[in-house]
Image (spheres, helix red, strand yellow):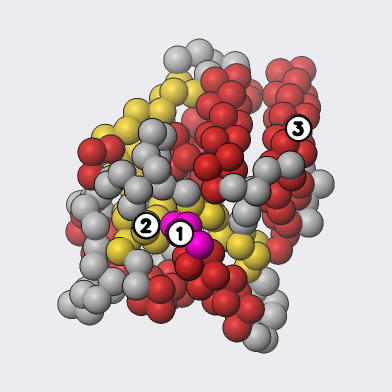
Amino acid sequence: MTLNQIKSTLYALILTNKYGLKLRKVNTPVEVTRLRLEYSEVLLSKLNIDVEVIGREKIEQSGQYLIVSNHRSVIDPLVVEIALKDKDVHGLWIAKKELFNSFFFGAFTRNSGSILLDRESSQMGSFFGDIKAAVAEGYSISVSPEGSRNKLDTPLAEFKKGSQIIAVKNRLQMLPVFIRDNTNTVLMESIKHNTKGLKVTIEIGDLIDYKDRSRTLEEAYKHQFNL
């Protein structure tokens, strides 16, 4: 690793755990959202990455959604947080068990209200129950339907079926957001070369009705963003 890579990694580790501890001390949706946004802005600023948001006006103030995003890098949730800035939308991310137990992300993931997804579990009742309870409290749910980071040379990996089930079960309108840049490439450019003036563009799509069965979520998402 280069010196800049070591410095960037240590800074991110310290900042992530610092905000993980801060989040442990708050319990209201407004405070949780404020701290996650603050963390996102501080870290992306340190990485010299600006976020351009196209179509922010499509997000209703105080809306409740299933927020559907593509996924290429660990910074994608931060980009989505910034896209929701100044909107009274309090989303909880669905996170894999590995993130809950991670030395790097564990404290932040556990304390930021993330919903645990244990793929090894044969019983998914508690997972869907946690989502239902969060929605009842007024939260939106943020999800990456691809499941894992897309490492392919295509703009989108195949969607898993669970996201559309979540929307239907909880009667959530689906808000599609598409990060147009390969965030992993941008992140590596920052970490390896300390490049200034990097930018990531995220586009907000039109709402997808959870009752519309004419297309799958993947088909509707691709149609929205001409993929």
The quarter of the picture where the C terminus appears is bottom left
Residue annotated with mark 2:
64
**Magenta residues, start to end:** 137-141
* Residue at image point 59% right, 43% down: 32
The CA span between labels 1 and 2 is 7 Å
- Foreground mark, 1 or 2, reads 1
* Residue at image point 65% right, 74% down: 119
Where does residue 8 sit, x and y in percent of width and height?
Answer: 70, 24
- Foreground mark, 2 or 3, reads 2
Side (left or right) of 182 relative to 205: right
| Lower position in the chain sequence, tag 1 or tag 2 | 2
The CA span between labels 2 and 3 is 29 Å
At mark 1, the secondary structure is: loop
Residue annotated with mark 3:
18
Amino acid found under the numbered disc labelled 1? Gly
Q: In this view, does 31 lie above or below 167?
A: above
Amino acid found under the numbered disc labelled 3? Lys
Where does residue 198 sit, x and y in percent of width and height?
Answer: 45, 21
- Of 64 and 212, the residue lying toward us: 64
State which quadrant residue 212 falls in.
bottom left
At mark 2, the secondary structure is: loop
Which label sits on residue 138? 1
> Taking the image as drawn, is residue 172 in sight?
yes
- Of 127 and 3, the residue lying toward us: 127
* Residue at image point 60% right, 35% down: 35
Pointer 3 with pointer 1, Cβ within 8 A: no
The CA span between labels 3 and 1 is 27 Å
Query: Magenta region, mostly helix, strand or loop?
Result: loop
